[in-house]
Image (tube, rainbow, N blue to C red):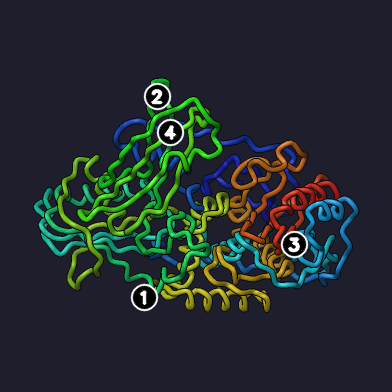
Amino acid sequence: MRVPRLLSSASRSPASLPSLLPALPSLHSRPSRHIIGGIGGIGGIARACCSALALVMIVGAPAQAAPHKHAKTPKVPVAAARATPLPPELARALAASKVPASHVSVIVAKVDNPLQTRGVVPAPLLAVNPNVPRNPASTMKLVTTIAALDTLGPDYRWRTQAFTDGQSDGRTLNGNLYFKGSGDPKLVPEEMEKLVAELHNAGVTNINGDIVLDRSAYSSDIGAQHAIDGGDDRPYNVAPDPLLYSFKAVSFSFTSNPNGTVDVGVLPPLANLQISNEMSSTAAGNCGDWLTRIHPTLNTTPDGAYVAHFSGTYPASCEDKGWNVAAPDRDRFFLGGFRALWQASGGQFNGNVRTGVVPPGARLLVTHHGQTLAEVVHDMNKFSNNVMARQLFLTLGLAADNNRTPASLTRSREVLSRWLDKNDLAMPGLVVENGSGLSRIERISAAELARLLQHGINSPTGQVLVESMPTVGVDGTMRNRLMNRDVAGNAHIKTGTLDDVSAVAGYVGTRSGDTYVVVSLVNDPRASNARGFHDALISWVYENGR
């Protein structure tokens, strides 16, 4: 067994991941940031919008020929999580947050290589209330990620299939076009563009029929859960969908012009979207209340169109701003996205869209293989995308019997429980609702999450796990934190934030060359004040881990 080292995020592609090394040196150079250029041409509409990760940042069926096989992961011994006092500088940082220590759980433990230590594990460097189950917010995504990488493998791909009940003459399809999804978390425009090209290669240019969307891969009660904050128009609350297109969310961008007009951009392209722009640019006023001043709305019309309306004044001092909103009606959203790219590619379609199932005897036209699990968890964790995490959690159950039974939360929880038992990862405090952390009832203790992180980094997929997490001071949700501290570039930390919850969890490479697991969970009405404490904790581990 080889243990992965912490590496910079400068290389994102799983194919280019460096070989795993038998040691865990810290990072001592700050990784370079990605600079993403534009892509021109009609065919680049989708690639341009997604290459910048704009759509992933809005929210935040296996195609393998054979199951992914791993080397056996050695059992990671458990050190007793005895309580230890916070060092003075951390005690002061916590006191400044006004959060009582009883509402905080912290554990800091050296990463253990079981083949080197032979079961002799030092006590944690820090342990404060380590066994108290708390709401982890988005650090729960690490549970979903580690279980998925271990059970599915980093090369796992989702599939979206197209069938027909009609006939084609090599150019025109006379009949309905059925799309059957498997819950691809990242069926974004660049992937839809590939699917469009595959349909053209299958001899389809004109479609004389309807688009029928088969969502039978998910149990019918999926999506019945109410939004955590009642905000159904907020992109992070979009419900799981076997045919989730572009996160079912629209991103509008606004740019003021010297002549007093305001340009409106939109991602993704939608053929059935109309924009009513009655805004004017003004030099008066600051940018603080810009959104309320333009009165944004997105509504539907009886004929299947979306109408976005903007009015009022847009402050020129705002420069470029954006409004992200969940789109109503998933069927018309899928249709609008497909039709935009279909027409841009020269295809013709004038039918309707509806939900249904692929009929017996329908002919398979195309199987589109989506992005790999390694690519999905990279975007999911870097930008804390809740919609992707909920889709991935459902995939645990769906893939367990090769997509023969519709996915459900119950089945995914059962698969996760069996995986934990198989790996001797007892977690009596674990409560999983949807696997994303966007929940008021999910729970895990700091000690349990730390043990899972020990397992994850010691597994054959440990490098993919580490690379998926935000790099401190460099990218993702940690991009603007600790930028000017020595720990920048030397830690991979997943963040978690809800009302009354603040959390960090991940790995810190220390100045001395060791690597530590760090978990801190704060549950308190003043949890938002704990960011300074968490930053101080990460820096302290970098300087003091031995």
Closer-to-camera residue (414/55): 55
Residue 105, relative to residue 467: is it above or below?
below
Q: Which residue is mark 1?
A: 404
Q: Earlier in the sequence, mark 3 or mark 4?
A: 3
Q: Secondary structure at mark 4?
A: strand
Closer-to-camera residue (367/49): 49
Residue 208: x, y in percent?
A: 11, 54
Closer-to-camera residue (362/241): 241
- Disc 4 marks a residue whose amino acid type is Thr
Question: Going by the image, does 52 lie left or right of 198?
Answer: right
User: Around disc 3, counting alpha carbons within 10 Å, would you say few (fewer than 14), some (14 to 19), or many (20 or more)?
Assistant: many
- Disc 2 marks a residue whose amino acid type is Gly
Q: Which mark is residue 364?
A: none
- Spatial separation of the CA atoms under disc 1 and disc 3: 38 Å
Q: Secondary structure at mark 3?
A: loop
- Disc 1 marks a residue whose amino acid type is Arg
Q: Which mark is residue 113?
A: 3
Q: Secondary structure at mark 1?
A: loop
Q: Earlier in the sequence, mark 2 or mark 4?
A: 2
